[in-house]
Image (cartoon, rainbow, N blue to C red):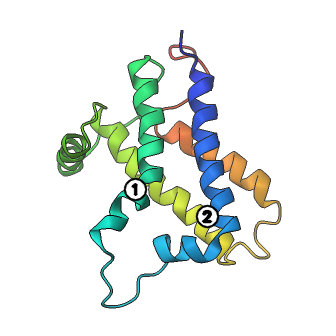
Amino acid sequence: MYKSHVCVERWVAVCGGVRAWALAHPHEYALIYGTPVPGYHAPRTTAAPAGRVARALTAVVCDAHAAGALREPPGPLPDALADEARTLMTELDIDLPAPVVAALVATWAQLFGLISFELFGQFNRVVEDRDAFFAHTVRRLAGGVGLSADPVGSA
């Protein structure tokens, strides 16, 4: 049986790997995920490398869903967002509930916001223990997409 906590640990590992790479290669991170240069359009060949993180996070969630270890995020999803989520599922050839896909997109943006704030100094004098803050936050992000260290069905 695929354990729920395995999904969370994979999620944490992906997020931690992205952060470690960004901290070790801040200029490369900034080129890919930083403020775009006005008028510059990246070549299409950069789209696949830039999407690696999203694909890795999506793979964790898809595996959890296939194993029955995923909780759907609470609350209704507006019709327009559900339509966008279904379009994205078709484009990416994934099978997930629409609310999970919407949560994945939001979480992907939150992860890069978290890393960017650390890398570009917005956490200075706000968050001192950045390792602990990051570890805590990425586990909360995992919960936001329906991953949990507790088995599905437990309270």
- Is the residue under label 1 in contact with that under label 2 (CB below 8 Å)? no
Q: Is residue 109 left or right of residue 124?
A: left
Dot 2 corresponds to which residue? 115
> Which one is in front, 67 or 30?
30
Mark 1 is surrounded, within 10 Å at the Cα level, by few (under 14), some (14 to 19) or many (20 or more) other residues, namely few
Residue 120 vertical placement versus 72 (above, below): below
Q: Is disc 2 placed on a helix, strand or loop? A: helix
Q: Quadrant of residue 94?
A: top left
* Identity of the residue drawn at 50% across and 77% down: 31
Residue kind at label 2, given as amino acid type: Ile
* Identity of the residue drawn at 71% across and 47% down: 135
Q: Quadrant of residue 75?
A: top left
Most extreme residue toward the front is 45
Q: Is residue 150 left or right of residue 71?
A: right
Q: Locate the N terminus and report the quarter of the image it occupies.
A: top right
Mark pair 2, 1: CA separation: 16 Å
Q: Locate the C terminus and report the quarter of the image it occupies.
A: top right
Q: Where residue 65 sits: x, y (%)?
A: 40, 24
* Identity of the residue drawn at 40% across and 88% down: 37
Q: Nearer the viewer, mark 2 or mark 1?
A: 1
Q: Is residue 71 visible?
A: no
Residue 106 vertical placement versus 153 (above, below): below
> Which one is in front, 150 or 36?
36
Ranked by sequence position, the earlier of labels 2 and 1 is: 1
Residue kind at label 1, given as amino acid type: Gly
Q: Where residue 137 sits: x, y (%)?
A: 65, 50
The numbered disc on residue 51 is 1
* Identity of the residue drawn at 61% across and 21% down: 150
> Which one is in front, 29 or 61?
29
Q: Is disc 1 placed on a helix, strand or loop? A: loop
Q: Where residue 111 sits: x, y (%)?
A: 54, 56
